[in-house]
Amino acid sequence: MRILHVLTLNSRNGEYGGPVRVARELCRELNNLGHVTHIFSGALTGFEPEAVPDLSESQIVLKPILKNFPLSSLWSWKLIVPLNGLIKKSDIVHIHFARDLVPFLAAIFAFLNHKPFITQTHGMIRKENSAIKKLVDFLFTVPILKRAQSNLVLSALERKHLNEISPKLSPIIFRNGISHTFLDLQTYELSEKRKVIFCSRINEKKRVSVFLEIAKEFSKLDQIDFLIFGPDGGELKLVLDKISEFSQKNIATTKYLGPLLTGEVTKVFANVDLLILPSLEDAYPMVVLESLSVGTPVLISRFCGNADDVKLIDPEFVCTSDGIGEYVTKTKSILQKYSLNSNRDVLKKLSLEFFDIKPLTKSLVELYKVATFKKENLTNES
């Protein structure tokens, strides 16, 4: 099959990081199965993504047309011809879907060209009280989701969110996976100073504030660096102010190191000691899987969409309460337990067993086949 994946944005700063990495992993595995894939996305001037040698990708530089919605309103009239042309050549269109102009346009072109399309919402669609978003849902979001051959969601919670927008939808749970390409990364080396990281968009939902509270409980004598990676999502000033405050006191070294390039994520993760992600209702964060895939332990909130799956690897990786005390206790325990390469190697193999992308991709191909068959029948009947 000729399969087109469409994304709002692929940027070096990783503003749309999760869906980008999901699309790339799926396309890489789809290529291995003999299919032909292409990823089409928007880009930002000066922050265009680095080329990936084994994948076919193209981008159009976009600009936001609404100041209050910088990602959702990314647009260029130059989108129209290449996107429509790629859709015409495809057997199926896989839209990484949000309330954004790019996926809306992709869905409209797929419909007009009688091409089957599926949506994958990555936790980005939920019921909103905003009058503007309600209007957008009425005019675009719900009609598009209803016309898709399948709506893919990451968890039961995300399925509930979609059904709150439209009870007539029947979303299919399709979680994220990881490939075996990470097995060959260099062996972790224990250094005198341990490295604990936060890596995600720096906003309220991801709770970088909790990460800072954890750091506050450690002193410089503990020989731990707390490192924060990620694009600003509204709380960067809070982070920088706290880091400045910490530097004046006997608190463990805390640094903000900016966003990671997409290709850097697993390389950085392979050489740190712990990833902490205390986010609220995070659908199924890829950074958690990527960290585990290179043998680096994680500590996440029970509100993370992959908390139940992560517990199966090590129950200590999930905080069952919201108190800082449990995060601090588990941070100390995990750092001690996974200081040995042998334990990290076991973790790596277990994570690849639990989250292997191969069976997921085979299931996706079956969904593509069903979608194509349904669309062909509907077209023939009309």
Image (spheres, grey):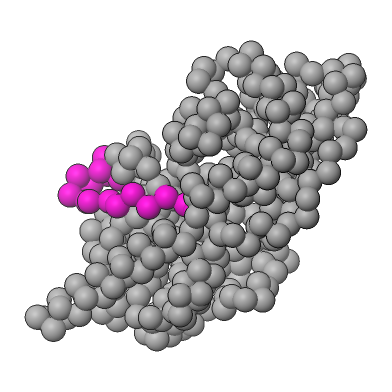
Q: Residue at x 28, y 73 (%)?
A: 369
Image quarter in which the C terminus is found: bottom left
Position of 342 compared to 89: left or right? right
Residue lying at the far left of the rendered structure: 381
Task: Name the foreground residue: 190 vs 113.
Answer: 190
Residue 269, given in percent of the width and then of the height, sits at: 71, 46
The answer to which image quadrant residue 257 occupies is top right
Residue 239, magenta (yes or no): no
Q: Is residue 226 above or below residue 215?
A: below
| Nearest to the observer: residue 89 or residue 356 | 356
Residue 130 at least partly seen: yes
Q: Residue at x 70, y 64 (%)?
A: 47
Prevalent SS, magenta region: loop
Q: Tell me the magenta residue range.
A: 162-177
Depth check: 253 or 35 in front? 35
Image x and y of residue 127, in percent? 33, 40
- Residue 316, quarter of picture: top right
Figure quadrant of residue 130:
top left
Q: Quadrant of the N terminus?
A: bottom left
Using the rendered image of the protein, determine whether residue 13 is visible from the camera's viewpoint. no
Counting every numbered tag in the picture gives 0
Q: Position of residue 56 (x, y in %)?
A: 57, 78
For image coordinates 83% across by 28% down, the residue present is 224
